[in-house]
Amino acid sequence: DGGITQSPKYLFRKEGQNVTLSCEQNLNHDAMYWYRQDPGQGLRLIYYSQIVNDFQKGDIAEGYSVSREKKESFPLTVTSAQKNPTAFYLCASTPGHEYSNQPQHFGDGTRLSIL
Amino acid sequence: AQSVSQHNHHVILSEAASLELGCNYSYGGTVNLFWYVQYPGQHLQLLLKYFSGDPLVKGIKGFEAEFIKSKFSFNLRKPSVQWSDTAEYFCAVNAGGFKTIFGAGTRLFVKA
C-alpha cells in the first residue's frame, strides 16, 4: 500500500544535539510538508517542498532545516537552535497539482522529547 | 492573517447523541475547506472536503459538513455518534497555494 513512513516513532534528544527525523513516501507525490503539532495549537507548518531540490520556509522554520534530494524523501533536522523542540512532528504530502484543493496525506508522526 | 477557529477543544457525548463541531475561518475570498480526523494511535486522515458546488458535503462514516459562506463557517455534523468516533477532529482551510491553515482541534470522547 502507498503511504508515508515516518521514523522513528519516538525520539529523545539531549540538550545541544541535532536530530534528524525521516519521512519517506511512495505515493509519487511532488509536494511534501513538515508540521509541528502541540496540544491546543493544531498543526503549524515548518517547511514545505514543491519539487526536488526546492523547499520553502513555513511559519515556524527557525531552528529547523530540511533537504529534498529525492522525490520520495524529505528529512527534517531539529537543530540545537530550536529552543522548544519537544513536540509531535507530522510529515505530509500532496500530488503536486492544484495544491490548494488537494487533501494532504499524513504519516504516523514522530514524538520528540528532550532529555 | 488567515486563521481557523474551532469553538470547542473538548466534547463529551453519549452514544447516539448528535454531534456538531464548529469551525470558522477568517478569509474573504475563495476557500477550500477540509475536516480531518485523528483516531487514537492512527495518522491524520481526510474526513471530508468542500471545493465548490453543493454546500452540504458528505464524508466517510456518516459525517457531513455545511459550508455557510455568509458566516465563514464549515461546521461538522453527525446525527448519531458511536463510541468508535472518539478521536481528535481538525478543521483546515486553504485559500490558494501551498499553505493550509489548521484549527487547534477538537477532542471528542464518546461514552459507551
Image (cartoon, coloured by chain):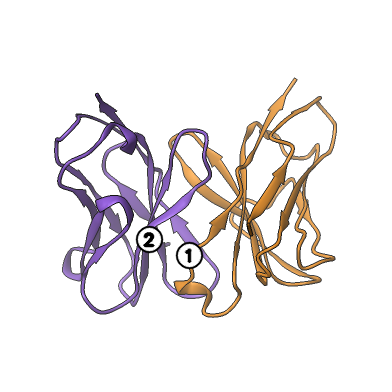
Chain colours: A orange, B purple
For the point 25% across and 36% down, the residue is B82
As helix, strand or loop, the secondary structure at mark 1 comes to loop
Marks 2/1: CA–CA distance: 8 Å
Q: Is residue A99 left or right of residue A91?
A: left
Q: Which residue position is annotated with label 2?
A: B34
Which circle marks residue A103 in the picture?
1
Pinpoint residue A64: horizontal percent, then vertical percent. Answer: 74, 48
Mark 2 touching mark 1, by CB under 8 A?
yes
Q: Residues within 10 Å of mark 1 (few under 14, many from 20)?
A: many
**Is A101 placed above or below B36 here?**
below
Query: What amino acid is labelled 1 in the image?
Result: Pro
For the point 26% across and 53% down, the residue is B63
Q: Quadrant of the N terminus of chain B?
A: bottom left
Q: Residues within 10 Å of mark 2 (few under 14, many from 20)?
A: many
Label 2 and label 1 in one chain:
no
Residue A81 occupies quadrant: top right
Chain of the residue under label 2? B
As helix, strand or loop, the secondary structure at mark 2 comes to strand
**Is A30 placed above or below B89 here?**
below
| Camera sees residue A38 | yes
For the point 46% across and 75% down, the residue is B96
